[in-house]
Amino acid sequence: MIAVKTHDYCVPPQALVNEVVAKFERDHTSPGVIVWDGTQVLGVLSRQRCLEHLSQRFGTPLFSRRPLRKMLATIVPNYLLLQEDLGINEAASRCLGRPAEVVYEPVVVLPKHGRPRLLSVHDLLLAQSRLLRETQALLVHSAKMNALGQLVAGVAHEINNPLAFVISNLGTLQGFVSALQTGCLALRRLLDESGVASLRAGPPRFRSDMTSTSSSGDFAELHRTPWKDWIVSAKSSATSGPSRVSTRPN
């Protein structure tokens, strides 16, 4: 309850009632007064109870110039003492658990050091209301983050499904590329060993293909192209691309 506003108004039992009334008139936020002898709390007189006694017939002439203990003697002591380190919700529960006729009477807060202080039940309930609003905001934020996490997990799942299909077929693609690479290397060795002229001396259909390839320049380009480097680069790109896009939800 450290964050809740409290009032430091303690008077000795011999203080006059009219002095307390003057204090109430100067400070309209004060919920009451603590009667304290310097070592212990002797009683609590709320603003409402004090004004009720004075508004009765002959109340003002009977009590106004008398010590405060005379008025306290006519009131059944039923005040609540709470420790300063008590939680706001627990303090509010204890206050509202009192009898109906004293449920809104101010509460005495006992600090670890120093004089006791007076707490208005109205201020305590306002502090509890703020605490509940803060807790509600945290719960709403937590629910939003949970929903966002589920959305992200769903999106990641939709991305990973097609990626898993692509990645699972990369092995087949690598087999085809390896076969193509082997064939290209074998063809290049054949060209280096036999030469283009010897290939043209083959069967008529093969000679026709070789002639058309040579005339278009593709055959010479095939002979000069570093096929091994190109195939390795293509295979690496096909493998690393989906791996970079792949997303795994936590």
Image: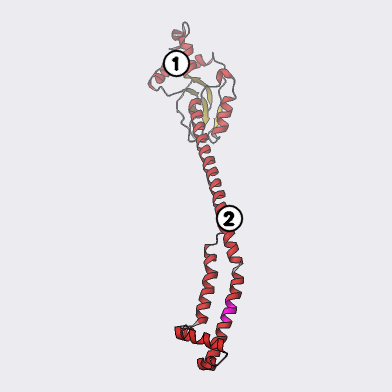
Of 180 and 80, the residue lying toward us? 180
Q: Identify the residue under disc 2.
A: 157
Check contact, mark 2 vs mark 1: CB within 8 A.
no
The label nearer to you, 2 versus 1, is 2
Precedes in sequence: disc 2 or disc 1: 1
What secondary structure do most residues of the magenta stretch adopt? helix
Kind of residue at disc 2: His
Residue shown at 51% from the left, 74% from the top:
234
Residue shown at 41% from the left, 22% from the top:
28
Of 148 and 156, the residue lying toward us? 156
Q: Where is residue 75 in the image (x, y as percent from the top left)?
A: 54, 15
Disc 2 packing (10 Å; few <14; some 14–19; many ≥20): some
In the image, residue 243 sits, relative to residue 91, either above or below, namely below
Kind of residue at disc 1: Val
Magenta range is 177-181
Q: Report the number of numbered marks.
A: 2
Q: Identify the residue under disc 1.
A: 17
Give the structural element (helix, strand or loop) at label 2. helix
Residue shown at 51% from the left, 93% from the top:
197
Give the structural element (helix, strand or loop) at label 1. helix
Q: Colour scheme used in the picture?
A: secondary structure
